[in-house]
Amino acid sequence: MRKVISGLIQASNPINDESKSVAEIQAAMLEKHLPMIHEAGKKGVQILCLQEIFNGPYFCPGQDKRWYDAAEPVPGPTVEKLAPIAAKYQMAIVVPIYERESAGVYYNTAAILDADGTYLGKYRKTHIPHCLPGFWEKFYFTPGNLGFPTFETKYARIGVYICYDRHFPEGARELGLAGAEVVFNPSATVAGLSEYLWKLEQPAHAVANGYFVGAINRVGFEAPWNIGEFYGQSYFCDPRGQFLAVADRDKDALVTAELDMDKIREVRNTWQFFRDRRPETYNGLVRL
């Protein structure tokens, strides 16, 4: 029997003041997260995932070049700050941050630290929205170019799918075929248009692919954009699509769940979706 304790952190932005510098806002958000990350470690969390661009606000409702200053190399300063914490608690951490590859080339990225603090690699958000008032992401992010990697941590093989990615089943399937046992979806999404999908799409991915899903959303309102309420409700669901733990919609929270990895085999032996695939018939999926 193999069980893994996993955790998600949802948090509001502590500074909603445009007069503050990008560096000040980022520092405040990191400082807010650090006690929660330590709390996770003290509670025995073995794999922890933070929310999308965790060390800052979701700045994509506007198109302001000053936020380019929020980008950093990956690995870089933030990853290096969290690596010793990962090692201290023997806790693997998924660290979603704004990545600068070079001047003018920026990605929405998640770095993966293993339980000894080793940097395992990164995932770059694949599907970049540029639609609806409030989601002008192509102004900030280059589409990811690393495919859908999975990462063998000390406790489980994991994959990452970031926010808008969750609307596309193709990458979710690739992660399953690549051996992901837990897929994390760090997000920043507000009440309204897609909230009804929040607890629909990702349990469906879990069922279709026979893995656990950890879905993370931030909370609160963020000025100056004020595009709506980030409604939290971060959760874990199992390979049957059943909810294991769900956070409140309006509170900072560390949500944890014990994931029974034997359930993956049990469910896949019942529903042989991978066996019964017919990839030779799916050519239409890759037509431009």
Image (cartoon, rainbow, N blue to C red):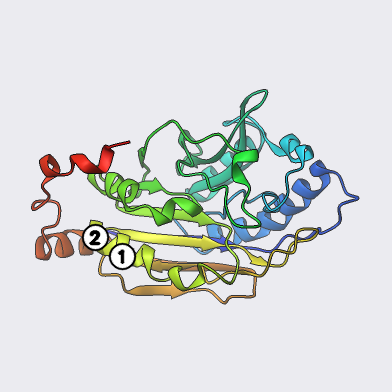
Numbered mark located on residue 204 in the image: 1
Q: Which mark is residue 217?
A: none
Residues under numbered marks 2 and 1 in contact, where contact means CB atoms less than 8 Å apart: yes
The quadrant of the image that shows the N terminus is: bottom left
Q: Quadrant of residue 240?
A: bottom left
Foreground pick, 119 / 125: 125
Q: Amino acid at mark 1?
A: Ala
Q: Is residue 219 above or below residue 286?
A: below
How packed mark 2 is, by other alpha carbons closer than 10 Å (few <14, some 14-19, many 20 or more), is: many
Q: Is residue 121 left or right of residue 35?
A: left
Residue found 59% across the figure and 46% down from its top: 85
Q: Position of residue 106 (x, y in %)?
A: 61, 32
Residue 283, how many percent across, how many down?
19, 39
To which quarter of the image does residue 229 belong?
bottom right
Q: Split into 4 quadrants, where in the image is the C terminus?
A: top left
Q: Which residue is mark 2?
A: 208
Residue at x-position 61% and y-position 53%: 135
